[in-house]
Image (tube, rainbow, N blue to C red):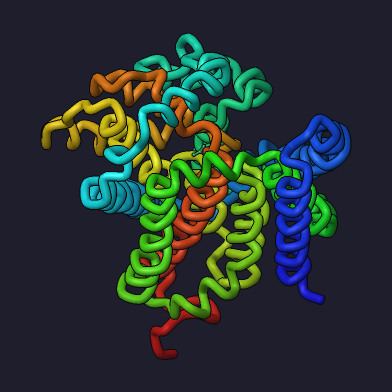
Amino acid sequence: MALHTKILLGLVVGAALGITINLLTGGTAGTEQFVSSVTEPIGRVWLNALIMVVIPLIVSTLSVGIAGLGSLKRLGRIGVVAMLSFLSLTALSTMLGLAAVNLLKPGEGLEPSVTERLMETYQGDSDAMGLAEGAFGIDLFVRIVPRNPVQAAANGEMLAVIFFALMLGIGLTIVGRENAQPLLNFLESLGHVTIAIIGLVMKVAPLGVACLIFSVTARFGFEILFNLVKYIVTVVGSLTIFFVVGYSLILWFVARRNPVEFMKRARVVILTGFSTSSSNATLPTTMRVAREELGISDAVAGFVLPLGATMNMNGTALFEGVTVLFIAQVFGVDLSLGSQLIVILMSVVTAIGVAGVPGGSIPLLMMVLGIVGVPVEGIAIVLGVDRILDMCRTTLNVGGDLVTAAVVDRFENGRRGPTSTIPE
Ligand code: ASP
């Protein structure tokens, strides 16, 4: 049986069991005990094992990728195409989300008693996830350049790690073949070993995925889902439309690839993104699929994908935009067109700084709420369903990375890979 089939099976079985337990027991202490002492630890061990190799993977592939480009001019060109693609995809998806939330107005019909209850229940969580000091703002940009790359890696500051890897790659390009070769050999070998480890970890993906989804569904408050159904439909509907229509159009017209074939080959990435809710944890899989299944060149995949997993969050930006407007509607705050433009801008900018981990966007989302004058504590209303939305937005995030890699690859290398529609 192919890996993606097994993962899908794990997802379906885990979700079905979780929902059944939830409906039968209604989330009693026994269920909680089972989830927190059995399925959640197993799921997290698997997730940890994936994230464990992300730093060596980013450092090795990004620096080798840049060295493989051969010249700084080419790096500049690819960098510009990749950034343009990231930014335009993110801006477009946010606009789609905003259009949907203005059209459907999910926040206007919500019962005040429901909001009150949700706020009471999730206030603690929102306080806990609150704004860590210096987590964003100007400081976020200053910290892109790390004083100490080892410390940045230890703290999981991905933008800083990326910056260091970029510099390493540029250094390798400058010093000339002879001087670069020993370090290049080491980094290449590190990359191979990392990929081998990921192969092993992905072998147990079906079990990991089943445990993760079971933990979410067995605990989940389906009653909240019911109350927030319009909001959820707005978020998930917009994400789906962007994934299906937006990505297909870009793949077909810009990357010149067959979208159906492309997504079929990328399904392990989609499933992994969905079940882990983490761009970082999915990166190793994205990398392998881009090279082996989609025929994207090593240099382009090695450059675009680590950057994308950290900076390109189309789904997250869309979600941020919709959620800010939803909470504004719930509280009766009228956001003018100007404020909505600020929401778009802030969603795009903050999405770059969001950590690619489950729930990574919540602290930055709270910042955007504050900036446009929407009550920050309103975040509590959506926290109860966030995990489900996180799974969906992460799927769009990782999909967007692959789409961008295909776009860059087309401009850099012309016809490539099995899904290309450009004639031989
Ligand atoms: N979980 C998302 C990701 O890893 C980030 C977020 O929106 O919370 O891509």
User: Along the horizontal axis of the image, is 32 left or right of 281?
Assistant: right
| Residue 277: percent from left, percent from top | 60, 45
| 58, above or below 282, in the image | above
Residue 252 visible in the displayed image: yes
Q: Residue at x 44, y 31 (%)?
A: 114
Q: Residue at x 88, y 38 (%)?
A: 38
| Residue 82: percent from left, percent from top | 38, 52
Residue 80 visible in the displayed image: no
| Residue 274: percent from left, percent from top | 60, 53
| 330, above or below 103, in the image | above
Number of numbered discs on residues: 0
| 240, above or below 381, in the image | below
Quadrant assignment for the N terminus? bottom right
Q: Which residue is more in the foreground, 299 or 87?
A: 87
Q: Residue at x 19, y 36 (%)?
A: 340
| Residue 418: percent from left, percent from top | 54, 81
Q: Residue at x 65, y 41 (%)?
A: 220
Residue reaching furthest left? Answer: 337
